[in-house]
Amino acid sequence: MAALFFSVLMLAYASIAIMTLIDFGKLSFVLSSLAICLAAAVVFISFVFVFARKLKRYDIIDAAWGPTFIVVSVTSYLIAYNDINPVSLCLLVIGLVAIWGMRLAWHIGKRKIGTKNEDPRYVELRRHWKGREGVNVYFRIYIAQAILATIICIPVIHINLFDGSKWTNLAWIGLVIWIVGFVCEVVADRQLKIHLSNTKSKGSIMQTGLWRYSRHPNYFGELTQWWGIGIIAAGVAPWWVGLIGPITISYLILFVSGIPPTEKRFEGREGWKEYKKKTSVLIPLPVKKV
C-alpha cells in the first residue's frame, strides 16, 4: 500500500512540476540540469563500483551514499552559478549536505574497514538474482542509488536553479531543524558505537540514551535533517518543489531500506518484543508502560 501511494504521489508530483516549469518557461533548463546532476552521480558511483569490484566487496556503496549527494549538490551549484552571494541559501544547503554526507561516509567507512566480511544484506540480494552478478549489482544497487540521491537532492537543486540568494524565515526555521537532526544522529550513532564496543553488553539490545525513547533515533536524526533542508527550499518559489526530497528519503527509511530490514534482524532476540512494545519506532517519545 505504501509503495502504491508513493508511486501515485511521484507521478502526480512529476505532472504538476512539468506544468509549473512550462509556466515559468524553465522546463528545458531544469530537465537538462537534472540530467547533468544525474550524470555526475552516475560517473561518481561508477568509479565506486570499479573500486568495489577490485576489492570484491560491493557494500562500500554504503560509505559512498553520502558523498553522492555532495556530488549532485555541487554540480547543480556549478550549473547555476552567477556571482552568488557567499552567504546565500545555495551555499548554506551545500554546506549542510556536505557536513551530513562526509560525516556519514566517515562513520560507515570506519565500520566497513573494521570488518573483513561483506555486509550480509548484499550477499543475500545477489543470491536471489539471476544473470551476471556485476551487471545486476551495478544497475540494481549502484545506479539505483545514484537516481535516488538525485531525487532526494531536488530541494538543493531547486534552491540553486531558482535563485536561492535571499534568506527567508523558513530558512532559519529549516536550519534550526537541521541542527537538531544532526545532533540527534551524531549522538545516537556515538551511543550505539559505545554500546557495541562494550563486551559486557555484547548481543544485548541498546535501550539507553536516545535509544530509550526511540528504536531508531539515528534515522530520526537523518530524516529531520532532510526535512530541515526541505523547509529551507520551501522559501524559494514554487515552494512545494523541494518537498519531494524529504518525502522520498522518508519513504525509503520507513518502508524500504531503513527500518524494516533493521527490525527484521532483531526479531527473536531476547528482550526485543518488550522493547518494541514500550519504545517509539522513530520519533523520540516517553516510554510506554507495558
Image: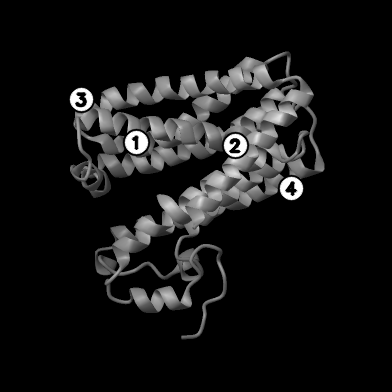
Q: Label 4 vs label 2: CA separation?
A: 14 Å
Q: Label 1 vs label 3: CA separation?
A: 17 Å
Earlier-in-chain disc, 4 versus 1: 1
Q: Mark 2 points at which residue?
A: 96
Closest to the camera, between mark 1 and mark 2, is 1
Earlier-in-chain disc, 4 versus 2: 2
Q: Is mark 2 on a helix, strand or loop?
A: helix
Image coordinates of residue 111 in percent, x first then y, are 31, 44
Closest to the camera, between mark 3 and mark 2, is 3
Q: Name the residue under label 4.
A: 173
Q: Label 3 vs label 2: CA separation?
A: 32 Å
Does residue 87 appear anywhere in the picture? no
Identify which residue, 277 or 237, lies in the foreground: 237
Q: Name the residue under label 3.
A: 54
Amino acid type of the residue that numbered disc 1 sits on in the rendered structure: Ile
Q: Label 4 vs label 3: CA separation?
A: 45 Å
